[in-house]
Image (cartoon, rainbow, N blue to C red):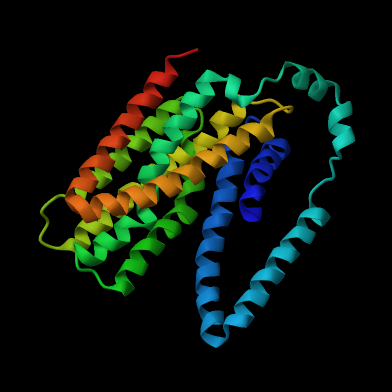
Amino acid sequence: MVNESFRPANATAIAHYSTPQNRTQAFSIVRLAINLGWGIGGALGGFLASVNYHLLFWVDGATNICAAFLLLWILPKVSLSQQQNSGIATVQKVKAKPPYADKTFLYFIGLQILFAICFFQLFTTIPLYFKEGLHINEFWIGVLMALNGIIIALFEMVLVFKLEGWRPYLRLMAYGSIIMGIAFFMLNLPFTHGFVVAVFSMLLITIAEMVAMPFMNSYYISRSTEGNRGQYAAYYTMAWSAAQVIGSTSGTQIAYASGFNDLWWIIGGICLLTAFGYQKLLTQK
């Protein structure tokens, strides 16, 4: 609970310290940092755990405390009174409406839950399918999962720079959802070598993630103001948390009851439905 409370504040801070022109790139830099931390932290955590589990927890706690002091030391200070006394912020705060009164945003949140339900299969049912359905061993499953973070770290910033301003945010989200749907459908193709299926599917999911996810933050931030940005960020975070619960439980249950093939057809279909929803939302004012 404490960990997740960091996310809305973090998203609001990124919006505050960036400009509308570089906001998507700012969120992409943060995603780059997260992916680097994910890769380095996983490797370091495994090493520390192999030495001593107590050492793992001491180092993990120390890095969190160091991050807190670095935030206080490096970032420019903006007090609550300064925000409240800002003429622009005051005007925006008067006009600001709560997120639950923004019907377009609520529709977007519903689509986010659908998208995230599909995306979270990457960390739950897909590794299971690689092992049980495609008969890939744990080492190569780890390599495939690491491939996602490596590609994002190397190419996402370049891709975001190229895509920024090319199409509306919602259309890019629709493109990403379609690509992810194709990736899940591909898992049902009768290739003789399962590793080939896994590689191409992982590549498509990663491309879908890079095309869609950086622009999701920019979209909901663009609908908020200084007065309610934290509330919008909280709703967005809650949507992903709900999807993680729903996606993990429903995905494994469907795979257990009906098999992985049916699961991939269902998840791919949800991706296409989500893409249609983004496109529909684009036509609304």
Question: Is 213 drawn above or below residue 105 in the view shown?
Answer: below
Is any part of residue 166 visible from this angle? no
Q: Please give the name of the residue rendered at 37% of the width and 30% of the height, measured from the top-left corner.
A: 174
- The residue drawn where x is 58% and y is 55% is 33
Seen in the image, is 173 located left or right of residue 259? right
Residue 178 image offset from top left, x and y in percent: 31, 35
Task: Tell me: 186 left or right of 275.
Answer: left
Q: Residue furthest top?
A: 285
Residue 217 visible in the shown view: yes
Point 55% across, 45% down: residue: 28
Q: Position of residue 46 (x, y in %)?
A: 50, 77
Q: Is residue 173 left or right of residue 71?
A: left
Residue 24 relative to residue 61: left or right: left
Q: Position of residue 273 (x, y in %)?
A: 31, 30
Above-or-below relation of 57 to 87: below
Residue 213 vs 226, above or below: the answer is below
Pinpoint residue 236: horizontal percent, then vertical percent. 55, 37
Res 179 quadrant in image: top left
